[in-house]
Image (spheres, rainbow, N blue to C red):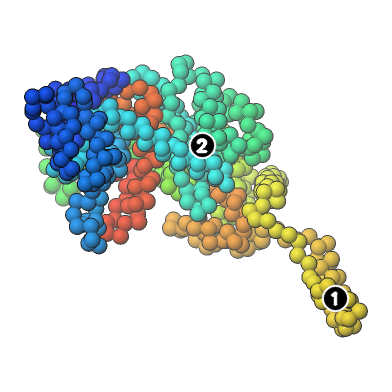
Amino acid sequence: MSHSKVGENETVEDLRNEDDINEDTSENVCDNSSRKRSWVWNHFIEEKNSEGSIAKCKYCKKVLSGSTKGGTSHLKRHLENVCKKYQKNPTNQLLLLPSSKDPIKCFKFNQEESRKILAKFIICAELPFRIVEHTVFLDFMRSLQPLFKIMGRKTVKHDCMALYQEERKKLHDVFKNLSSRVSFTTDIWTSNQKIGYISFTAYYIDSDFTLHKKIISFKKLPYPHTGFAIEDAVKKCLVEWELDYKICAITLDNCSTNDAVMRRLRDHFCASMLFSGEYSHIRCCAHILNIMVQDGIKIIHEAIECIREIVRYVSASPSRMQAFNEILQHMRLPARKGLTLDVPTRWNSTYEMLHDALGYKDALIRYATEHSCVCPTNDEWKKASIILKFLEAFLDATKVFSGCKYPTSNLYLKEVWGIRALLMDESIDTDETVKQLTNEMLKKFNKYWSQCNNLLVIASILDPRSKLIFVEFCYQKAFELEECKKKIDDIRACLFQLYNEYVDATRMHPSMSSSERTSNFGGQGDISSVSSKKKFGMDFAQFRSQSSSKRPKRSELDSYLDDDVLPDLENKEFDILAWWKSNAAVYPILSRMARDVLAIPVSTVSSESAFSTGGRVVDQYRSSLSPSTVEALVCTQDWLREQYDEVANCSSSVTLNVDDDTLDSWSGQFRRTE
């Protein structure tokens, strides 16, 4: 196989661009002018005679044709099928002593396995396919394993696509055998190719009570991105993965288009959805929090703008930052490389700017006095402090809602009612700005959360630290007595309705067959041979059995609700999935219900994080990648990431937590290296 070399003046960026532009071009896999590059010539001696060129086997000394027109297929057949002295499968030969128990000495080289690992590396590190043709990479691979046959960029791309199909089949089999329901998030993104993509992420809890997040689709979405286009993409994805009968809930952002999409999806899949899909639409809590914060910031935008101006002024030049740092030294405060300047459309960056500015408030005031620049007034600093207090509570809630490695649905009610308590407490403040601020936020709160999604409330009940008593406590704080009682009755009715559905499903599809057991006192013998005393005992046992069957049995749900709640609702170390796993034998039906409900995500952050990966895959140097290749790279990276997380967590010699941020930093390092 021949390889195009990379010149010394050719950058990796050029490699990436050329790799993508030539993605669908054919690859030159053989160079007739250099036939000795074939591995078979390592086992033959080429000689010349009067009739032409011959090839003599190094092992059995058999002479074969060595003509340039004959190729090398006959030489390969001789080694594999005829020559008895040749050790077959040379790529699997032992490199060192095979008799040793040392794993290094027993190592066997496998070309196919090495190619698969290389494909994994390229996908996870987000490298261009053409990296395998780089001169330094070739030298690196030869130094590690001379037997490894280097492939071209098209072969590597083929390996990556084959790996995608292999991992996809594995995941499809997992879904096929999955006994629990699956929840989803979806969102839309436009790449630098000006192509719209729709991401579809699945959440489920397996039989071992482990939460999984899988990006199952990252497809091109035809323009215009109407509700019908989104609905069609979602339907195709569900049917393609055979998950249309396992839908639990779908989490979407608060776009009005998504409301119409969910109405049509409910009509189409209602027969297989919980409550006929009535509570299957989950609104992204992170988006709702963002809307509430943005409305609150508008009330004191003048104070925030004043602080933004002083921060922008000080950070505008190195000389100003040097003067500011001199003030910090005099005040015995740590020096700064620069102050945080926010992006007005991102409220979390506004929080960081206000947090830093208030921390250096005295220094900023002193700088403004010495350099005669505009500085916020005391009233504006006070207003900034007020909004910072609110943003801190919203920031904490956003972090909770955005989690993807732990259940979030059971935390929904606690976080939402915590925000409501904050707004209600501050709304009675005598400060007019505070009143106006909280009133605006309460309007949005009541718009989106005055009616809680019953499926998420049930998730809170399935948290053994809260149960139904916590829901009663929250509702009593929010509603009048009659309305509170009505809402509690509605939640209780929904809870028992859902539980009964799982009971019926368990009866229709029992996990194991069972038969009615009857006592056989005295076996098949004549009853007259049984003593009167023993017969009296048999009659009582039968009477007791009939009486117990007439009395209503106590259900799992009744027992669960009557048991005491676990203490310490604020305990963040509590693992709710581990609790349900350990109590699955006590509550077999409830545990199945918990697996479905607790897997519901309350935000679409995971789908949006897929766009970060997509943005790195389809960067300015790989903008010619086809949508099918982009989907394969994004999805496979997500699937492999969980596998390597498990390897890292199980490693006894190295402790490594490969989370999303770590992988992002890794990919950033690769790009910086290029």
On the image, the x and y values in percent for residue 455 come to 60, 43
**Along the line of sight, the residue nearer the viewer: 108 or 137:** 108
Q: Residue at x 35, y 56 (%)?
A: 650
Residue 248, position in %: x, y? 58, 40
Residue that numbered label 2 is attached to: 184
Work out whether mark 2 precedes mark 1 in sequence or the reverse, and give the earlier one: 2
Foreground residue among 397 and 267: 267
Q: Quadrant of residue 15 in the image? A: top left
Do the numbered discs 2 and 1 sit on residues whose CB atoms are within 8 Å?
A: no
Which of the pair 174/309 is nearer the observer?
Answer: 174
- Residue 57: x and y in percent read 16, 38
Give the residue drawn at x 22%, y 33%: 75
Q: Is residue 35 visible?
A: yes
Residue identifier under label 1: 525
Q: Is residue 169 above or below residue 518?
A: above
Residue sitting at x 45%, y 16%: 223
Q: Position of residue 538 (x, y in %)?
A: 84, 75
Tell me if I can see residue 283 in this picture. no
**Picture quadrant where residue 355 is located:** top left
Q: Amino acid at mark 2?
A: Phe
For the N terminus, the image quarter is top left
Q: Quadrant of the C terminus?
A: top left
Total numbered labels: 2
Residue sitting at 24 percent across and 45 percent down? 84
Q: Secondary structure at mark 2?
A: strand
Classify residue 402 as left or right of residue 77.
Answer: right
Tell whether 251 sits left or right of 272.
left
* Amino acid type assigned to the residue bearing label 1 in the image: Gly
- What is the crowding at mark 2: few (fewer than 14 residues within 10 Å), some, or many (at least 20)? many
| Residue found at the very far front of the displayed protein | 50
